[in-house]
Amino acid sequence: MVMPPESVLDALAVTLRSQVGPAVADPFAKTQAFMAAVILEKLAGQLRAAENEDRAAPADRQAMLADLAVLCGAPPPRLTRALDALTADGGDAAWCGLVEALYADRAALGPDFDLLLGRVRVAMRGRLNRALAFSS
């Protein structure tokens, strides 16, 4: 049976913390062993967070796109292209294109602009929160 990478990193961290660190006499080497365990635990957490992002991102993106379709029944052509691009690809460039299209079509959207931008901001904040979950 193959262990997932995050489980391997967790196991290595436990070994460094519980067996290697206590067995080392030199204070510098002991500190390095414990710090290596901390780094491995952080990496394992980042791998788990990436899996969560892979699952959550498409669902959040689809929910936002559905909300935007309700809020803006007939979007201008540029915004339509940006929405289509984001539907096909949830990458950073597509999100950037959506924001650029919103601002470019601001006059055409009128009062709907603030509603649309607010919904996009909520979705982007969710993306950012997931990306930063293990940054500290």
Image (cartoon, rainbow, N blue to C red):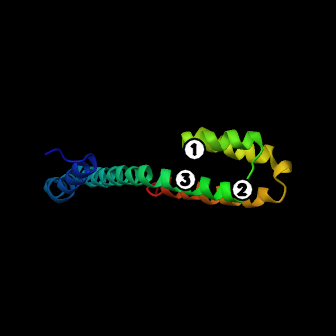
Q: Is residue 65 visible?
A: yes
| Circle on res. 62 | 3
Q: Do the residues labelled 1 and 2 touch (CB within 8 Å)?
A: no
Q: Which quadrant is home to the N terminus?
A: top left
Q: To which quarter of the image does residue 23 belong?
A: bottom left
Counting from the top left corner in percent of width and height, residue 72 is at: 73, 55
Marks 1 and 3, how far apart at CA: 7 Å
Determine whether the residue tagged by mark 3 lies in a helix, strand or loop.
helix
Q: How many labels does the image show?
A: 3
Q: Are marks 3 and 2 in contact (CB under 8 Å)?
A: no
User: In the picture provided, is 33 more to the left or to the right than 86?
Assistant: left
Disc 1 residue type (three-letter): Thr
The residue pinned by badge 1 equals: 87
Between residues 103 and 35, which one lies in front from this camera angle? 103
Counting from the top left corner in percent of width and height, residue 19 is at: 14, 56
Counting from the top left corner in percent of width and height, residue 64 is at: 60, 56
User: In the picture provided, is 93 more to the left or to the right than 5?
Assistant: right
Determine whether the residue tagged by mark 2 lies in a helix, strand or loop.
helix
Q: Residues within 10 Å of mark 2 (few under 14, many from 20)?
A: some
| Circle on res. 117 | 2
Determine whether the residue tagged by mark 1 lies in a helix, strand or loop.
helix
Between residues 15 and 66, which one lies in front from this camera angle? 66
- Indicate which label's residue lies in the foreground, 3 or 2: 3
Question: Which callout, 3 or 2, points at the residue further toward the start of the chain?
Answer: 3
Disc 3 residue type (three-letter): Gln
